[in-house]
Image (spheres, coloured by chain):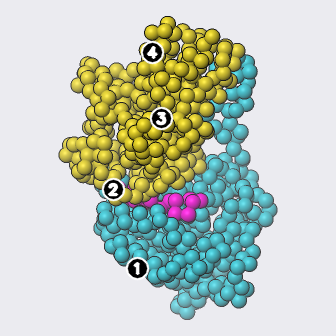
Chain colours: A yellow, B cyan
């Protein structure tokens, strides 16, 4: 398939898996409900019919062993895609991810890599509660040896996953549950940018909004509202958190002099803090105001829809933060 | 030329003597402060498990080990000099000095890695089993772990998967009676561990680690079954002659118990068996002496081996040609010089 067409984030992910499995016979998908059920969010629907039960493997509810088996498979010639149904389940699998997958190449002196992708999804938006709604990317970003991708768009859902399935190292690929039905354009032959590069989703000269995953869309919404008041916000989509493209961020902030980092994850100790610290280091002489974080509240995610929505940043808060920063 | 089966006990004797000589020298190396750190866990007393199972595995088979895995690696062909260099944190070690005793590995010999997390290396053999089936490779993957891992949940997740998917996998518990300082009866509510394995549908056997031929026989049967898609579990009972690690004087057990335990010596046992047959003392002494000389040479190699270069700190965090971490000093210089620190 060539040329641009409209699809959804979910279908783009499925197409990425399907195309990658067609191109590389060592790719296997392993996880809970990935086969006959088609994935808890339908991402892997139909793959078992197309690629067979020995490549789309329904696993028991054993998150640690799913990730651990993927590690062993990746060391012995396969390229597994392990699916963790919710990123919250990382608590069960963290030893295999952080102590095994992330460290094997280094500990063993470079003699073997762990080319696996851990697909998972996080975030709020479905009243799924405190154990099914978190944004835990900081756990992976704080672990050397792991790459971390968090696509915001349909095109990136496809292209970042395809690229992750060519890398020599473990990739934690975190989708957002509220984006699966989002529509957008996809050209399988043309990624928005190379892996590891951030993309300016909207240009502006007054302030830089740095975001990733679903918060890119909230930042864009805020930018649209601010534009009505004559404030031009530049919106940067990081796309990957490791590698982290500070060059694109710094190029923007040194023009605008103001930076707001937007993240759905709770504020304290989060990735937004890391990005804010780097902006401060890289752009200190250009900053007109403190680097501001607009992040999730430091609370567990509640179920009740109003409370859930209030626990994460929305476009109004992002826009208000910008208004407060400007003279 | 005698038939191979006639030579097998001698080969096993040689392997066990090499393991013991290696471990004794690792201990000495530590006292001489030539090892990288103090995280050394000797397998003296457990040679029967390593030699019995290691000798029954084939080229192409793979394995993971726990933190007390020197003997297993030697039994699978690990070169003592490169092992000793790794334990000393040297550049010519198996992992270029970055892994050390607890993270030694060699893909060429199918060693998928020693592990410092109790049970951490177990599920990797499930993945290896998936690979062998998918890639149509005639190989078995063996997870070696201690009795401490019998209380870890990951073992049972892995056993279930291996049995469910009929993978070419063998789980081996080297039961040296102690998880660090806690004896098995203080850690495990039921010591009939083979029943745990059977309840998952695994083939299961117990073997007495003091009798290397018994271990070897059980390993042959279980490896053959695993190769046919009937995964198994083997519990080998032995006694950890010394402390958990080099600094441990074992205050949690009595001298009487230790004396009794050390009498369960697989090397002394096989030697007595061989002498009761047609072996001569001098023949066996020659094996012991050769093992000692080999391991002395390994020590010399390790001591003389170069340390890693400082820049190697940043190598192999990620694959070749991938973005690598920026050293903190360079970050600081870049930032204060007005640049952008990637």
Cβ–Cβ under 8 Å for marks 4 and 1: no
Q: Nearer the viewer, residue A85 or B54?
A: A85
Give the numbered dot on residue B195.
1
Look at discs 3 and 2 and give the one toward the viewer: 3
Q: Nearer the viewer, residue B149 or B271?
A: B149
Residue for badge 3? A310
Residue for badge 4? A225
Residue A112 horizontal/vertical position (percent): 50, 46
Residue B312 horizontal/vertical position (percent): 65, 39
Task: Identify the residue at horizontal 45%, vertical 56% (top origin).
Answer: A64
Q: Chain of mark 1?
A: B
Chain-order first, disc 3 or disc 2: 2
Query: In the current view of this chain or complex, which residue is farthest to the right?
Result: B32
Q: CA distance from mark 4 to mark 1?
A: 66 Å
Look at discs 3 and 4 and give the one toward the viewer: 3
Q: Which residues are magenta?
A: B115-130
Residue B340 lies in what quarter of the image?
Answer: top right
Chain-order first, disc 3 or disc 4: 4
């Amino acid at each position: 398939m060539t040329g641009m067409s409209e699809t959804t984030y979910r279908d783009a992910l499925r197409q990425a898996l399907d195309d990658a499995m067609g191109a590389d016979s060592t790719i296997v998908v392993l996880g809970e409900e990935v086969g006959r059920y088609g994935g808890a969010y339908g991402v892997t629907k139909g793959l078992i019919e197309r690629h067979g039960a020995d490549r789309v493997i329904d696993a028991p509810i054993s998150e640690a062993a799913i990730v651990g088996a993927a590690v062993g498979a990746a060391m012995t010639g396969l390229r597994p895609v392990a699916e963790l149904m919710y990123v919250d389940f990382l608590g069960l699998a963290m030893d295999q991810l952080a102590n095994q997958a992330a460290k094997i190449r280094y500990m063993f002196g470079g003699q073997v890599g762990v080319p696996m992708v851990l697909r998972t999804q996080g975030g709020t938006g479905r009243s799924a509660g405190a154990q099914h709604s978190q944004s835990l990317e900081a756990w992976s970003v704080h672990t050397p040896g792991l790459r971390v991708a968090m696509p915001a768009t349909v095109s990136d859902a496809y292209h970042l996953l395809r690229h992750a399935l060519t890398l020599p190292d473990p990739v934690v690929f975190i989708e957002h549950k509220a984006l699966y039905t989002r529509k957008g354009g996809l050209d399988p032959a043309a990624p928005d940018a190379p892996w590891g590069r951030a993309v300016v989703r909207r240009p502006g000269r007054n302030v830089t909004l740095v975001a990733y995953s679903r918060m890119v869309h909230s930042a864009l919404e805020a930018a649209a509202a601010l534009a009505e008041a004559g404030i031009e916000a530049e919106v940067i989509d990081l796309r990957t958190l490791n590698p982290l493209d500070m060059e694109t961020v710094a190029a923007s902030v040194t023009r605008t002099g103001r930076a707001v980092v937007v993240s759905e994850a709770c504020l304290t100790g989060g990735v937004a803090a890391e990005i804010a610290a780097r902006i401060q280091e890289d752009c200190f002489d250009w900053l007109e105001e403190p680097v501001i974080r607009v992040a999730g509240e430091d609370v567990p995610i509640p179920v009740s829809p109003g409370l859930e929505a209030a626990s994460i940043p929305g476009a109004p808060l992002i826009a208000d933060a910008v208004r407060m920063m400007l003279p | 030329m005698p038939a191979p089966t006639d030579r097998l006990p001698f080969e096993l004797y040689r392997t066990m003597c090499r393991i013991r000589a290696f471990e004794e020298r690792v201990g000495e190396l530590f006292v001489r402060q030539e090892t990288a750190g103090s995280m050394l866990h000797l397998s003296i007393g457990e040679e029967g498990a390593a030699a019995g199972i290691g000798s029954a595995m084939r080229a192409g088979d793979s394995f993971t080990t726990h933190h007390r895995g020197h003997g297993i690696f030697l039994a699978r062909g690990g070169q003592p000099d490169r092992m000793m260099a790794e334990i000393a944190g040297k550049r010519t070690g198996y992992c270029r000095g970055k892994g050390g005793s607890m993270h030694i590995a060699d893909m060429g010999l199918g060693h998928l890695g020693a592990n410092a997390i109790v049970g951490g290396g177990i599920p990797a053999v499930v993945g290896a089993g998936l690979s062998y089936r998918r890639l149509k490779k005639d190989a078995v993957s063996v997870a070696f772990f201690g009795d401490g891992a019998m209380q870890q949940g990951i073992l049972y997740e892995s056993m279930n998967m291996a049995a469910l998917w009929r993978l070419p996998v063998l789980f081996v518990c080297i039961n040296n009676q102690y998880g660090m300082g806690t004896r098995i009866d203080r850690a495990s509510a039921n010591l009939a561990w083979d029943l745990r394995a059977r309840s998952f549908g695994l083939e299961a056997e117990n073997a007495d680690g003091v009798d290397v031929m018994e271990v070897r026989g059980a390993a042959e049967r279980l490896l053959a079954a695993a190769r046919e898609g009937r995964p198994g579990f083997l519990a080998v009972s032995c006694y950890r002659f010394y402390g958990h690690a080099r600094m441990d004087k074992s205050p949690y057990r009595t001298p009487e118990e230790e004396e009794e335990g050390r009498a369960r010596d697989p090397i002394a046992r096989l030697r007595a068996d061989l002498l009761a047959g047609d072996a001569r003392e001098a023949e066996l002494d020659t094996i012991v002496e050769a093992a000692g000389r080999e391991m002395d040479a390994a020590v010399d190699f390790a001591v003389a081996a170069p340390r890693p270069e400082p820049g190697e700190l940043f190598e192999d965090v990620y694959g070749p040609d991938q973005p690598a971490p920026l050293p903190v000093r360079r970050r600081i210089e870049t930032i204060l010089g007005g640049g952008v620190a990637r």
